Amino acid sequence: MSFPEHRPRRLRRTPAVRRLARETHLVPSQLVLPMFVREGITEPSPIGSMPGIVQHSMDSLRRAVAEAAEQRIGGVMLFGVPEVRDAVGSGADDPNGILNRATEAVVAEVGDAVVVQTDLCLDEFTDHGHCGVLRDDGAVDNDATLERYTAMGLAQARAGSAMLGLSGMMDGQVGAVREALDAEGFTDTLILAYSAKYAGAFYGPFREAVDSQLKGDRRSYQLDPGNGREGVREALLDVEEGADVVMVKPALPYLDVLADVKASVDVPVWAYQVSGEYAMVEAAAAHGWIDRQGAIMESLLGIRRAGADAILTYWAVEAARWLRAEL
Ligand code: PBG
């Protein structure tokens, strides 16, 4: 027997063997595109810290969703940027609010060719930028916020949203919204729970994307970056409360949490590759410091490998195009 006895490189020798030996695959239907629609504009408006991403007008949103559907991605996640904000986020459950109108328009355009999803959170609609309503002392009032979420969830379901993305990190939000939906007959409306959503620096460009009014931070409701087991606990609670899908967010800095959640629940687990992750790669690529397509596809594959069944990513349509070209 000659040395070495084991030769794992045999499985890497040619492109054909490597293709056959690959453990993890990525297909367009596993990608969900987050999109921003802004009230009161007629032309799309670029977002400086997210090159290539825009705040859509109603018309450009419809066209972009149709284009996304053509690439056979799995879904779109809609975020609204209202013209007027107030303390309780009234625009969120107003049927004429920007997000609800946009949802109706998008569903009319593409039906269920992609799964139309909506962000269920108050931060885009409040004048203080927090994800919930505030008590007199300025703290976020968990249980009063749940009432706003159920109203918002019902408005989104009525507008035709197929899946509500509960991103506010209030205790009991999944159970409260599920119960309200069921009571009104929306038993088919899916709930995506942003279960393990971490407080941190990677949402910076998103704040520009939604003209966030936030001063301060979200550390009293989003998770501490040091806590992995707490992320698993949140996911288990959300499953118990009726979540159809649980999510970990951001993605790359939290792949360990993603893997642990995947091992702990029996529902699909998704990950959100957030605005800061997008901006880092785009900035490095713009300097010529990194291979853009290579870095994008490697990050998506890594997130899949760690356990994500699907991924929210601002590169969804572009990545789908590359994936389809490879076939
Ligand atoms: C809350 C929400 C946020 C993101 C998605 N949903 C903002 C936040 O928690 O501050 C961030 C997504 C991203 O950074 O790409 N509505």
Image: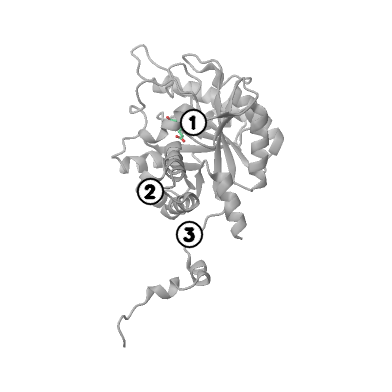
Task: Say which mark, if any, is on residue 48.
Answer: 1
**Considering only order in the chain, which callout, 2 or 1, is on the residue closer to the N terminus?**
1
Foreground pick, 313 / 247 = 313
- Mark-to-mark CA distance, 3 and 2: 15 Å
208 horizontally vs 322: left or right: left
Could you tell me which secondary element the residue under label 3 belongs to? loop
Label 3 belongs to which residue? 24
Q: Residue furthest bottom?
A: 1
Is the residue marked by circle 3 packed among few (<14), some (14-19), or many (20+) residues within 10 Å?
few
Q: Which amino acid, mark 1?
A: Gly
Q: Secondary structure at mark 1?
A: loop
Give percent across and percent down for residue 135: 38, 14
Q: Are discs 3 and 1 less than 8 Å apart at CB?
A: no
Q: Residue furthest left?
A: 226
> Which label number is shown at residue 222?
none
Does the closest atom of ligand 1 sit within 8 Å of the Cβ of label 3?
Answer: no
